[in-house]
Image (spheres, rainbow, N blue to C red):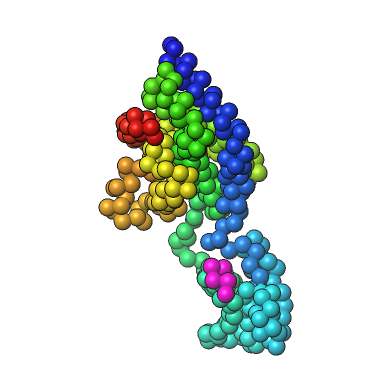
Amino acid sequence: MEAVKRVLRLGVKELWSLWRDPIMLALIVWTFSVAIWIAATARPDTLTHAALAIVDEDVSQLSLRLRQAFAPPQFNPPALLTHDAIDATLDAGRHTFVLVIPASFQRNVLAGRQPALQLNVDATRMSQAFTGSAYIQQIAQGEIAEFLQRYRGTPTAPVELALRARFNPALSERWFGGVMELVNNVTMVSVILAGAALIREREHGTVEHLLVMPVTPLEILLAKVWSMGAVVLLAALLSLVFVVRGALGVPVEGSVALFLCGTALHLFATTSLGVLMATLARSMPQFGLLVILVLLPLEMLSGATTPRESIPFAVRQLMLLAPTTHYVELAQAVLYRGAGLEVVWRPCVALAAIGAGLFVLTLTRFRHAMATGL
C-alpha cells in the first residue's frame, strides 16, 4: 500500500512539472485540436473546389450538359471564357483547368465520329492537376454516354453495378483523416511526454533527489507511465468528442469506452518506449532526433497512412512487433466499423504483450541508468 501511495505521489509530481512547462502544454493542445483539424480538412489527394473554366464553341444541348456536370464540392462553378483568354487565365493562375468544347461537337458525336475535347491544365498544381484530369475525363465520358443513350433510345444494360460504400458512404477524406491523425498523435505525444519527463529531471537537476529518496526505479517508472498516459488519454477523449465528433462531424460507430481501453493499453507501450529512448539520449535535442527516427516508421508502416496489404510482406510481418500496428487496427475496427471486444481482442492482447515487453526492457535500462547516475 505504501508503494502505491509513493507511485501516486510521484505521478502527481510529474503532472505538476508538466503544468509548469508551457511548451509541452501548447504541444498537447495543438496536436489534439488544430493539427487534427488541419489533417482532416487539407485532403491533398482529394479534388475539392477546383478552379475550372470552359470554352464552349458548340453551344449545344450536349455542351450545356457538360457545363452543368462540373459542380461542387469537386469543382467550383465553371467560368465561361473565350478561346483567346485561355493563355491569360492559366498564366495568372486563376484556373487550374480549361476545358475546350469545339464547334459542332454534338453533331459529330451523334454522327458516330470521335471528336476531341481539349483540356488545358496548369501542371504547377501537380497533385490537383493529376487527380482533376481523371475526374474531368470520367465525368465527360459519363455525360456523353448518357446523352447518347437517351437520344438513341438504347436500352439499359441487363446488369448494373450498384455501389454501396460501407462505413464512409460519402467517401469523405475528412472521416478518415481526422481519426487517423488522432491515432498518430496519441502515439507521438505519449512518447514525447514520457521521454521529456525524464529529460526534464536531468536538466533541472532533480535526479539526485530521486536517487536519495526511498523509492525504487520501478516506482519511478510506473509514476511516469501512469501520469503521462493519463494526460494523453484525457486529451484523446476530449479531442474525440469535441474535435472529431463535434467540429469535424465524424460519426463514431463503436464504443468510446472500448476505444479508450485499447488506447490505455497502447499508452502503456508507448510511454515505456518514450522513457527507454530518454535513457539513451543525453539531452532534449538528442531525444528529439531519436523520436523522429523511431516515430516515422512506426506511424507510416502501421496501416494508418496506407493499407498494410500494400506494404512488403517482410516489413508487414516485422511491424507486428510494433504497438502502432495493433492500435491502428483496433481504432479502425471500433471507430469506423463499430466492432466489439469479440473482434478486437487480438489487438488488445498484442498491445498488452508488447507493452509488457517494452516495460520490462525499459525498467532494466532505467535501473542501469539510475545506478550510474543517469
Q: Residue at x 64, y 60 (%)?
A: 73
Q: Is residue 61 visible?
A: no
Q: Between 253 and 184, which is closer to the camera in this rendering?
A: 184
- 323, 229: nearer the viewer: 229
Q: Is residue 127 magenta?
A: yes
Residue 104 on image: x %, y %? 64, 87
- Look at 62% across and 62% down and name the residue there: 48
Residue 348, percent from left and from top: 38, 33
Q: What residue is at 61 percent from the left and 33 percent from the top? A: 20
Location of residue 258 with respect to 159 vertically, above or below: above
- State which quarter of the image contains the C terminus: top left
Question: Residue 76 sits in which quadrant?
Answer: bottom right
Image position, residue 21 (x, y; %): 59, 37
Q: Which residues are magenta?
A: 124-128
In which quadrant will I find the N terminus? top left
Q: Main secondary structure of the magenta part?
A: helix
Q: Quadrant of residue 63?
A: bottom right
Q: Is residue 258 left or right of residue 81?
A: left
Q: Is residue 98 visible?
A: yes
